[in-house]
């Protein structure tokens, strides 16, 4: 039987879709610097995949040690990787035309576009209904699509990580540094990610007595100016559901490269 914990169910289903590693908790680590939390996960980030489906950020290999994103929290004798050319980063806005679901999940867009509420404010909205007869399913709703950030010269990252991995593990595990007790092979370098300002995730298992499962997702917000947004999941069965309002630099998927010491 498939693992019941929501992040395991979600990751197991959606990692097969070929978009990278799907985070159940894609929000940036709030314990880090304000510069990092405002930016979110980005190519060049080094971190650890945690046991609740998120990413524990450590430092970024492209930023100087005193850059606000790193804030001095880097391995001893740290030297950033300088890109070998001026345009190594591919940026693709609107990279997803559809929501991302596990196999055999059907969905219908109930409403989309602009409407006016009683106050006369224009609102942008989207509503979807998902259904499947499968025993379990995972769903990522992207009402505002996402922007892909992909570092093209992965060979330079691999070479740099290989040369520095021993120092990284010493920094992460050393009692005089972070003392994380991270096992060999647990550090990852992000080579690409998909960033969005709003999303909804779901991981569900169908009750044994039910023929199918059904979920509804709604996102509605003020168009332009200050956001006043409602994002809502409605489930007719027991389900694990998460959602976030529009906020800069939220991440749906990441492409981490594992490194061993």
Image (cartoon, rainbow, N blue to C red):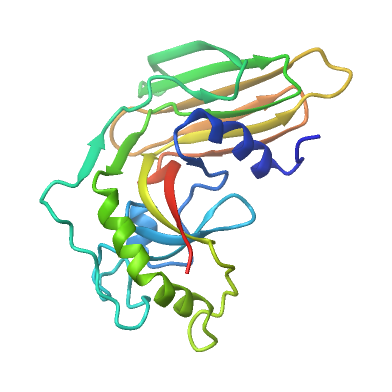
Q: Please count the marks in the image.
A: 0
Compared to residue 250, the image places residue 213 above or below, namely: above
State whether residue 60 appears in this view.
no
On the picture, is 246 further left or further right than 207?
left
Assign the N terminus to one quadrant of the image: top right
- Write down the quadrant of residue 3 in the picture: top right
| x and y percentages locating residue 229 in the rendered image | 45, 34
Residue displayed at 48% across by 64% down:
260
| x and y percentages locating residue 10 in the rendered image | 62, 37
Q: Nearer the viewer, residue 115 or 42?
A: 42
| x and y percentages locating residue 28 in the rendered image | 45, 55
State whether residue 105 appears in this view.
yes
Compared to residue 249, the image places residue 208 above or below, namely: above
Instruction: Give the residue at the far bottom of this rendering.
Output: 176
On the picture, is 78 further left or further right than 15?
left
Instruction: Give the residue at the far right of this rendering.
Output: 209
- Write down the quadrant of residue 120 in the picture: top left
Compared to residue 219, the image places residue 159 above or below, namely: below
| x and y percentages locating residue 186 in the rendered image | 54, 61
On the picture, is 129 further left or further right than 250?
right
- Write down the quadrant of residue 143 in the picture: top left
Residue displayed at 45% across by 79% down:
171
Compared to residue 257, the image places residue 185 above or below, namely: below
Residue displayed at 30% across by 60% down:
159
């Amino acid at each position: 039987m498939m693992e019941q914990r929501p992040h395991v169910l979600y990751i197991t289903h959606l990692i097969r879709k070929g978009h990278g590693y799907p985070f159940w908790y894609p929000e940036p680590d709030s314990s880090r610097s304000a510069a990092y939390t405002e930016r979110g996960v980005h190519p060049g980030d080094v971190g650890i995949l945690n046991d609740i489906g998120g990413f524990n950020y450590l430092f970024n290999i492209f930023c100087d040690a005193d850059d606000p994103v790193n804030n001095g929290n880097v391995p001893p004798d740290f030297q950033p990787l300088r890109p070998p050319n001026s345009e190594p980063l591919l940026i693709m806005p609107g990279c997803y035309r559809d929501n991302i679901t596990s196999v055999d999940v059907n969905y219908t867009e109930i409403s989309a576009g602009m409407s006016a509420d009683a106050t006369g404010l224009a609102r942008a909205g989207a509503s979807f209904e998902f259904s499947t007869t499968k025993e379990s399913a995972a769903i990522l709703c992207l009402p505002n699509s996402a922007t892909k950030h992909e570092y093209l010269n992965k060979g330079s990252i691999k070479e740099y990580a290989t040369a520095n991995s021993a120092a990284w593990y010493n920094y992460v595990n050393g009692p005089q540094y972070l003392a994380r007790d991270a096992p060999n092979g647990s550090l990852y370098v992000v080579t690409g990610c998909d960033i969005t300002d709003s999303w909804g995730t779901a991981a569900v298992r169908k009750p044994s007595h039910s023929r199918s499962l059904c979920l509804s997702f709604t996102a509605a917000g003020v168009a332009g100016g200050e956001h006043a947004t409602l994002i809502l999941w409605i489930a007719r069965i027991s389900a694990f559901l998460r959602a976030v309002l529009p906020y800069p630099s939220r991440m749906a998927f990441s492409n981490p490269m594992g490194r061993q010491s």
